[in-house]
Amino acid sequence: MHYSELGLVNTNNMLSTALKKGYAVPAFNFYNMETLQAILEASRITNSPIILAVSESALKYMTDDILIGMISGAQYKIGKIALHLDHGHSVEICKHAIDMGFSSVMFDGSALPLEKNIELSKKVTQYAHKFDVSVETELGVLHGIEDKNTKSDYSSYTNPDIVKDFVKETKTDSLAIAIGTAHGAYKRQTDSAKLRFDILQKIAQNIPHTPLVLHGASSIPNQFVSKINKFGGNIQHAKGIPTNQLRKAIMGHITKINVDSDSRLAFTSAVREQLYKNKKSFDPRDFLQIAKESITANCVNEIRTIMKSGN
Ligand code: G3H
Ligand code: 13P
Ligand code: ZN
């Protein structure tokens, strides 16, 4: 199925507008009906464009048919919603997502030798562009757990000297870069650790027209971590990217901000609190409704205070 039949758009217009106007488009990950509904509700409230991000493992979890069924039944198709494969690790999975109805794919060849990354990224853009699907690629490796298929224990910043040729060769529509963010809830070693704005600046100078993507951009709000710990959880030393650094990155050319961990924390903290407080309830809708509202409120807040992509 082509994505236009699902009322979706690719990310090209939304990102080029964001680049021109100096804000960022949020990419929020989802993996079930509740997380999808919660994110769409945030988009409706703020009138913000939204990139619905699905990792390979999330796709496996939801299954192709259920995912497409949910997307085609979603209410808020206002022409500003993209369905994006997050961290596609093979040409095949990217092609599969495009054939299913995704309007955008990320080919993540960041762990490959440069030549191989270029070769495979090119294959993905050649296929995707035939269907007007947008493509994100990656240069540089983030610290932490990228997803269940990509684990890296080191961080190698994006080399600004190679981005221009990479973009030219691959014809990628946007580029994910490594400037010190990390996936998951354990990002910075110290409170003073800063993103490498010097590297960002050089990259932006070298490819001023290419939207830049920041993965691992959750701010890990302390309220969620505290609530999880208060109601029976045990999450220690969690640290996110401070909001002011995310703002600085957006002012410095970042046009897509990826957030997954914050939504997971928003969801889990609400579930823990509800289950703890309502010991007699056993209708999952009681806590799932509150969990959805918790994600929506956090997404709305981040759209308003960090991405500034909506009202
Ligand atoms: O960057 C990766 C996302 O947070 C997805 O993670 O594979 O656990 O769904 P996941
Ligand atoms: P976080 O773990 O910081 O939410 O990053 C999510 C991400 O980069 C998804 O691609
Ligand atoms: Zn990511």
Image (cartoon, rainbow, N blue to C red):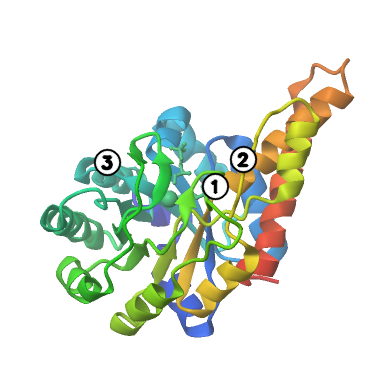
Q: Earlier in the sequence, mark 2 or mark 3?
A: 3
Do the CB atoms of the residues marked 2 and 3 lie less than 8 Å apart? no
Q: Whole-Å distance between the Cαs marked 1 and 2?
A: 6 Å
Residue at 50% x, 76% y: name it.
Answer: 18
State the residue position of label 3. 93
**Residue 115 rendering spot, x and y as whole percentages:** 11, 57
Task: Specify few, some or many for label 3: CA neighbours under 10 Å numbering under 14, 14-19, or 20 or more.
Answer: some
- Residue at 45% x, 77% y is 253
Q: Nearer the viewer, residue 299 or 141?
A: 141
Q: How many numbered marks have been drawn onto this rendered protein structure?
A: 3
Task: Find numbered disc 3 in the image and state the secondary structure of the residue it sits on.
Answer: helix
Label 1 crowd (10 A; few <14 / some 14-19 / many >=20): many
Q: In this view of the protein, which residue sits in the foreground, 194 or 303? A: 194
- Mark 1 Cβ and ligand 1 under 8 Å apart: yes
Name the mark on residue 260.
Answer: 1
Name the foreground residue: 181 vs 51. 181
